[in-house]
Amino acid sequence: MSACADQHTQADDMISVELVYALPQRQSIQILHLPKASSVTTAVQQSGLLQQHPELMDQSAPWQQRVGIFGRMCAADRVLQQGDRIEIYRPLLIDPKEARRQRAKAQQQID
């Protein structure tokens, strides 16, 4: 088999995915080239993101419970497909229902 054919075969065994983690001040976006059948966990581990952002290892809200693809929550062991956009979500600072209650209460005090 020629070197060109070897490269083509190797490329056929790989997928490209995007990994995104956004903070209020900045965002991290990486393009990763991984073997087919790689999981979300594999992508996150190979990205180096866990070393760059140690807060993701916080056991009270582990990243594995705050991950999605194209805005939809998914399991960390989900197998990736070509072109997937993996998103790691930050933990909520306040429950959305509680935030609405607080805004409504504040509005009532103004009125």
Image (tube, rainbow, N blue to C red):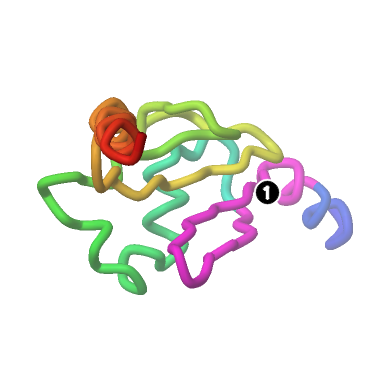
Looking at the rendering, the stretch of residues picked out in magenta corresponds to 9-33
Q: What residue is shown with label 1?
A: 16
Most foreground residue, 98 or 3: 98
Q: Main secondary structure of the magenta part?
A: strand
Most foreground residue, 30 or 10: 30
Q: Is residue 13 above or below residue 27?
A: above
Q: What residue is drawn where x is 45% and y is 37%?
A: 39
**Placement of the C terminus among the 4 image quadrants:** top left
| Direction front: furthest residue | 111
Left or right, residue 31 beside residue 23 = right
Q: Is residue 72 above or below residue 83?
A: above
Mark 1: give few (<14), some (14-19) or many (20+) Cα within 10 Å. some
Report if residue 65 is visible in the image. Answer: no
Q: Is residue 41 above or below residue 21?
A: above
Q: What residue is drawn where x is 49% and y is 30%?
A: 79
**Residue 21 x/y as whole percent:** 47, 57
Q: Quadrant of residue 4?
A: bottom right
**Residue 80 x/y as whole percent:** 55, 34
- Residue type of the residue flagged with mark 1: Ser
Secondary structure of residue under mark 1: strand
Left or right, residue 33 beside residue 99 = right
**Residue 32 x/y as whole percent:** 60, 57
Report if residue 40 is visible in the image. Answer: yes
Q: Quadrant of residue 53?
A: bottom left
| Direction left: furthest residue | 60
